[in-house]
Image: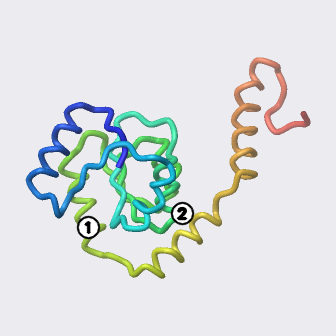
């Protein structure tokens, strides 16, 4: 699910979907209102991104208890916080192995949902705002001469 950015990857996915329609359905972009149904039936999220500034798909999947296999881009690793299987960017073989591992150890629905709720509880907008503030203060401190973490 989602609009592919890499034309080569998109072509590979179309070939794989055509070769085994029961194993892979390449859907493309979907309306946000349809995403919940896709997550509810997902065995895993595979996100082999080459460029990513946000880990939103990782966060969405983990919060719903969907196992994640993603590239090792910093945004994806940070968002997952150790709760995803990662592979080197562009390493199709490792991505395939990681996905096979995840799919070979399925959890039952209640366990997946419990995990998702526990993972989501470790995240909050307040924590994110504090982190952004810390980063911005650290960046501004050299320019202003102020000590990071000081009064604002």
- Residue 15 vertical placement versus 105 (above, below): above
Residue 97 versus residue 136 in the image, above or below: below
Quick check: 88 above or below 61? above
Q: In the image, is 149 to the left or to the right of 117?
A: right
Q: Residue 18 vs residue 99: left or right?
A: left
Image position of 98 (left or right of 49): left
Q: Nearer the viewer, residue 65 or 87?
A: 65
Q: Nearer the viewer, residue 24 or 90?
A: 24
- The quadrant holding residue 15 is top left
* Quadrant of the rendering where the C terminus is positioned: top right
Instruction: Give 35 or 133, whichever is nearer the viewer.
Output: 35
Q: Which residue is labeled 1 in the image?
A: 101
Inter-mark Cα distance, 1 to 2: 20 Å
- Who's the residue at 75% across and 45% down the image? 130
Residue 75: percent from left, percent from top: 49, 42
Q: Residue at x 75, y 38 (%)?
A: 133
Residue 63 image label: 2
Q: Nearer the viewer, mark 1 or mark 2?
A: 2
Q: Going by the image, does 16 lie left or right of 116? A: left
At mark 2, the secondary structure is: helix
The disc at residue 49 is none
Return the disc, 1 or 2, that comes first in the chain's sequence.
Answer: 2
Give me the residue at 34% from left, 36% from top. 50
Q: Residue at x 31, y 40 (%)?
A: 89
From this viewpoint, which residue is outermost toward the right? 151
Task: Assess disc 1: are there few (<14), some (14-19) or many (≥20) residues with their C-alpha within 10 Å of its C-alpha.
Answer: few
Q: Position of residue 86 (x, y in %)?
A: 36, 53
Residue count near mark 2 (Cα–Cα under 10 Å), binned few <14, some 14–19, many ≥20: many
Check the image and name the residue furthest to the top: 143
Report which quarter residue 151 is drawn in: top right
Q: Secondary structure at mark 1?
A: helix
In the rendering, at what x and y percent does residue 4 appear? Answer: 31, 37
């Amino acid at each position: 699910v989602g609009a592919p950015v890499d034309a080569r990857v998109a072509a590979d996915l179309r070939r794989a979907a055509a070769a085994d329609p029961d194993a892979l359905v390449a859907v493309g972009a979907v309306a946000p209102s349809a995403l919940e149904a896709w997550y509810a039936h997902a065995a895993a999220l595979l996100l082999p991104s080459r460029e990513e500034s946000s880990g939103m798909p990782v966060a969405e999947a983990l919060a719903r208890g969907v196992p994640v296999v993603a590239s090792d881009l910093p945004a994806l690793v940070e968002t997952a916080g150790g709760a995803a299987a990662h592979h080197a960017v562009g390493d199709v073989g490792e991505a395939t192995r990681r996905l096979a591992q995840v799919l070979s150890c399925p959890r039952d629905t209640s366990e997946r949902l419990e995990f998702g709720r526990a993972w989501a509880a470790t995240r909050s907008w307040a924590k994110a705002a504090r982190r952004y503030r810390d980063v911005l203060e650290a960046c501004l401190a050299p320019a202003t001469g102020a000590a990071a973490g000081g009064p604002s």
